[in-house]
Image (tube, rainbow, N blue to C red):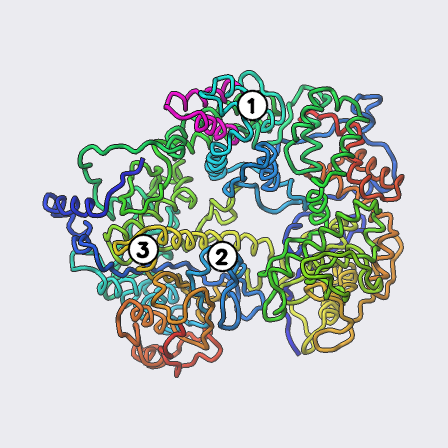
Amino acid sequence: MLALALVTGCYSGLTADGESDASDTSPDGADGEPDGGHDDGAEDGSDDAGDSGGSPSGECGALSMNMRRMTLAQYRRSVEVIFDGLVSPSSRFPAPSGETQSGFSTELGAREIGEHDVEQTLYAAEDVAEEVSVVLPQFLPCAEQSPPTQACAETFVDRFGRRAFRRTLTADEREILLSAFALAQEDGASFADSIALVVVQLLQAPQFVYLSEYDAPSERPLEPFEIASRLSYLLWDSAPDDALLDLAENGGLATADAVTAEAERMLNSPKADTTVARFFREWTRTRRLTQADKSPDVFPSFNADVAASLGESFDRFVVDAVREGQSLEGLVEGAEVWVDANTAPLFGVEAPAEGQWAKVAVDPERHRGILTQPALLASLSHSDRTSHVFRGYFVRSRLLCHELPPPPAAATSVEFDLPPNPTARDISEARMANDECAACHASLDPPGLAFEQFDALGRFSPTDALGREIDPSGVLTGLGEDIVFADHAEMIDALAAEPAMRRCFARQLFRFALSRMETPDDACVVEAIEAVLEETDGDLSAGLLAIVGVDSFRHRETL
Amino acid sequence: MTTRFDRRRFLFGAGGAMLAIPLLESIAPRRASAGGGLAPKRLVVVHHDQGRMVGNGLPDDWWSPGSVTGPLPPVGMAPSTMLAELAPVRDEIVTLDGIDNLVRHASNMEDGHIPALVSTLTCAPQAGTDWSSTGPSIDHVAGLRLRTDAGMRASVILPASATPYFANEISGIEFYGAGGTEPALLSGNPAEAVVELFGPPMPDEGPRVPAAPTLQDRMVARRVDLLSGVTEQLQSLRGRVSAADRERLDRHAQFISNTQALVGGGGAVAPTDTCTRPDEMQMPIVLPSNYEEWQQIGNPPEWVRGRNDAITWPHQLENLVQALACDVVRVIGLTLHGDPAWTSEFPGGSPFEGSNELHNRIHGMASVSNNPQHADDIAVGFASHARKFTELIQRLAAIEDIDGARLLDNTLVVWVSDMGYGSDHQAWNVPVVMAGMSEAFDNGQGRHVVHNRRSMGDLWAHVLRMLGGDDTTFGATGTLGELGASLGIGDLSLSAGHASTTAATPLHMGALDL
């Protein structure tokens, strides 16, 4: 007999309503906190929250939005937009980092800036300024005049300041930037170098570093430039481009219909692809795998190319689902995937030509939709073996939004008697013999074990490494009616038809859009997203845009 | 602006200063290398506590690049989870598995750390139950051989940053002078360390024709003014955001002010390709300089800067490499803190703030999966260690030595720890990374080398051979049992070792596959 020190936690007891389940932490440790959870109010579809009785912000009232720092992706794209793609973003920009409660990276923007960040922001701004000075005439033709005039400097400040601050500058802001230019001129710097000093200040200004909105004594409609920023960072992870800023300035975002139409145009643009992919990655905790993520001893064929292909296969799959007008159900049940030479073997299909990608049909009994994407299952694994706890936790927390208490302190020191070479199910069953562990793992392990036929790279095999048949059957509890399933395919079918999953998806869309967990005050907006999903049969595009259609999106709550 | 020196001019000036201030003799640069030609060999020994920071025998050993000898992943790819920051210098390094700190077992002390710390660099047994060793550490032994004459210090020990926890009783006890005496430990305050290394600043020799300022010069010269402009922008925004956001902006403004103090007058380290005495006037004010001072004055605002590696480390790094470039000393021990706060890695507040916090968390790491949050925090913090190593290698590579080669080509860098698996005090399979002096590696660099058991004595003997010696042993010799018997220790502390460690285990097992 082998004694196993339990390395995956368990919990004591269920949550108050007895419905939610519990698990250990997610593979990336990101969900140490309870997963939000307002099941009660949102489940009956009632509309009793936030009725403001004919308020301009609609029946749900305005949304509160804290000032946020840009993520690294947002910074990079913003710099590209500001300088017409002619200047590289600096690698020294200090992006906010750490764990999130919602799982969405933009939540990190709410974190405090640190002293080191402020210093690094200075160096990052200098990096960009150096490049700007070299290519300046390419996007500022008046810089080639001999000599360039003060008016040319003002043109730069007005045009590029507007892009960086995402609105027309105030007189003060404009004056401060021009004084940087004057300082450099006093030093005898060239015109281009003087503009570079303006850029150093511009890219450190809180107006650039933070996404902020004016606060007013009472809720207020957003100004058109603010709507443009909300749209742009929501759908493109980037600063608004000139076209969007012009639209805002010229009254083109003045009505709900105009905002919705613009949002549709933006979602349909290829510029939205990486943001769409980010939503699905962060919702499903699908990480960008690297070679170091998997044990070279167990998976000698796993290299950087395969890791990159796994990620691209996932991204192509989810972006295609949105572009093809698929529903949430289709996303979960679809039997077509994107493969290249690296990923085709993982799906058991013929590989396209080297360097090519192809959309191919796969065996639906094995691969079924997003939940069997190898990148997802590999993310929900250890480096050398599967983890039914990570996977079960994923189903509970990310697909069903069940509230998950943290593991008890003693969870890691519980020992069990196990047979030699125990299977995942052996380990799970041993855990069930301990009442305290079983209280949570009884509901947590079965949905994880359903995926046990997929190894730590996400490859399907009916047998394990020792040739033993894997039993993926189980019962999914906690959904009102228990779901008995023979394998992952049956469980996925049941989940796809499960209203709780659609409701949870609405919450995830809210968290993505607002960069935070929902509060009781947000119940009405979450329900509005649910309603859109209901009306459109779970259409993914409609879901991603649902928040934009709520009047609250165009209004700001006082903080 | 930093004070730049031409190497020859600097050395000449230093000679003059020696005549005037004889007390500086022991710390002044040597004349010997001023004539050019053959460059001296140097050694940097880097040490951090707690090895891999996990328990042993688990599949999630996040330090090791692999279980067999072979090439490391290509440049730019992470050798392993904890060594990801070494990716940029992949071609310059060799990582080693399978090296045990055997002498650690010849101890009567129950403490899991002291016997390992005092023996890993010395291969000499602990002094009874004292928190010290009976022999010199490798840096001192090598330094005695490499130095020009008795006027040059054999070795100096530089703390990577100024976390005052550094000088508490546990940390910093891995380096020793002759017979286990205290080493030449320099200040964690970069501005003090530069004076300890180079002496007072040299007078400038006449006017020099300034070169036309570059854009970088102009930006550096105007950093303080431009940051003031940023503060003005911040103030113009401040009145229009919520009360909570105003508080955030106020803290941001305070950090801008701190940054102005940091970069005021010229900014951080300016890269150079000549021997340069770092200018302490351009360094941040860091208090306190040592543990005793910290106990007396508590935590003044300057302390925040001192414990922030990102602020102090660039200056200590420059002190280190310039001390080698200017031939002030030829062997340096770099001690990464045993109890680091890693403040710079956690802008929102470090989970390792407070004495012993890292130690306590590592003991919970019987497996990475035990507590993923703690594991993630440790991995983030450890990346700070690894990044320092990478920056050290890159900086050594950027400086031209007296023979025209890279300073790195004449400098061997060895990064070790006291233990293999800090979580359970196990002293086998010590993590080792070597770099620099590429010609001394018979099989090249960019490799991971797995030994079927070698000792720290084998490692240090090999290092001495790479530096020109013919050593086959270092420190204690014979078997572990013989060493224990000579100390009157009948019951060796073997539980912290490799499963096959016994009294008959020899303290030297053979050459390394380098």
SS under mark 1: helix
Q: In the picture provided, is A112 more to the left or to the right than A500?
A: left
The residue carrying mark 2 is B87
Mark 3, chain letter? B
SS under mark 2: helix
Say what amino acid the circle numbered 1 marks.
Arg
Question: Taking B395 as reference, is A543 above or below it?
Answer: above
The residue carrying mark 3 is B407
Which quadrant is the N terminus of chain A positioned in?
bottom right
Query: Which stretch appears magenta?
Result: A174-203
Q: Which of marks 3 and 1 is in front?
A: 3
Q: What whole-number distance in Å separates the C-alpha atoms at marks 2 and 1?
A: 42 Å
Crowd class of label 2 (few under 14; some 14 to 19; many from 20; radius 10 Å): many
- Majority secondary structure in the magenta region: helix
Question: Taking B477 as reference, is A339 above or below it?
Answer: above
Which of the two discs, 3 and 2, labels the residue nearer the N terminus? 2
Residue A518 x/y as whole percent? 73, 38
Question: Taking B273 as reference, is A239 above or below it?
Answer: above
Residue A35 x/y as whole percent? 71, 47
SS under mark 3: helix
Residue A323 x/y as whole percent? 79, 44
Say what amino acid the circle numbered 3 marks.
Leu
Numbered circle sitting on residue B196: none
Say what amino acid the circle numbered 2 marks.
Ala
The residue carrying mark 1 is B238
Q: Which of marks 2 and 1 is in front?
A: 2
Mark 2, chain letter? B
Check whether the beta carbons of the residues at disc 3 and disc 2 lie within 8 A of each other.
Answer: no
